[in-house]
Amino acid sequence: MTGIIRRSNPPGLTTKRSHIYAQTVRVERPSAIVFVSGQVARDEDAKTVGIADIAKQAEQVLKNLQRALAAEGAELVDVVKVTVYTTDLRYAPEIDKVRQRFFKDRLPASTLVEVGKLAHPDYLIEIEAIAAIP
């Protein structure tokens, strides 16, 4: 038996932003669970990408997330939950566009949080994830 991931937006829980996340994600066993620490906009040389550019930072963060998942034999399709931290909720529409490009219709459950600061003053976004590998 292989694991199955089912995503849904039940009636009565839909929101105008539901095109970037699923309200519920159910994982049937057996699955391995992978927890990915918050990824920031640093490249492989530890240089910050896209200083003052949320779209470039979001893209780098998601590329880093893909790299972390690949190291565990997972892909974005396996992501069941993300938490997105940003220093300004006004960035949400730009973040959403980048997320849509990466996740397409494989929508994870999602939480978006505005924070006062991230680990470095140049960071505008950080994303942590949970993946279930069937």
Image (spheres, helix red, strand yellow):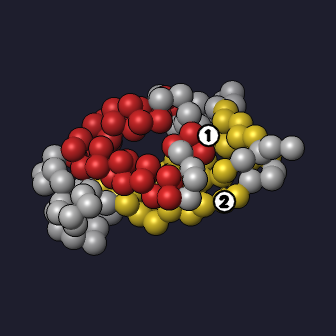
The residue singled out by tag 1 in the image is 23
Instruction: Give the SS element for disc 1.
Output: loop
- Between marks 2 and 1 in the image, the one whose residue lies nearer the viewer: 2
Residue under the image location 30 percent in, 55 percent down: 125
Residue most extreme to the bottom: 119
N-term mark: 2 or 1? 1
Visible residue check, residue 123: no
Q: Which residue is drawn at 23% across and 41% down?
A: 55
Image height check: is 97 above or below 42? above
Q: Which of the 4 image quarters holds residue 34?
A: bottom right
For the N terminus, give its image quadrant: top right
Q: Position of residue 76 (x, y in %)?
A: 51, 43
Q: In the picture shown, does residue 9 fall above or below 132? A: above
Spot occupied by residue 78 in the image (x, y as percentages of width and height):
60, 45
**Image-quadrant location for residue 33:** bottom right
Query: Residue 115's spot in the image, x, y percent?
Result: 32, 63
Q: Total label count?
A: 2
Checking the image for residue 131, the label placed there is none
Percent coordinates x, y for residue 107 in the rendering: 55, 36
Q: Which residue is drawn at 21% across and 64% down?
A: 45
Badge 1 amino acid: Gln
Residue 134 can be seen in this image: yes
Question: Quarter-wise, where is residue 72 in the image?
Answer: bottom right
Q: Which of 63 and 84 is in front in this view?
A: 63
- The answer for how far apart the CA atoms under marks 2 and 1 are is 19 Å
Q: How many neighbours does mark 2 have within 10 angstroms: few (below 14), some (14-19), or many (20 or more)? A: some
Tell me if residue 120 comes above or below residue 95 in the rendering: below
Side of 20 where 39 appears, left or right: left
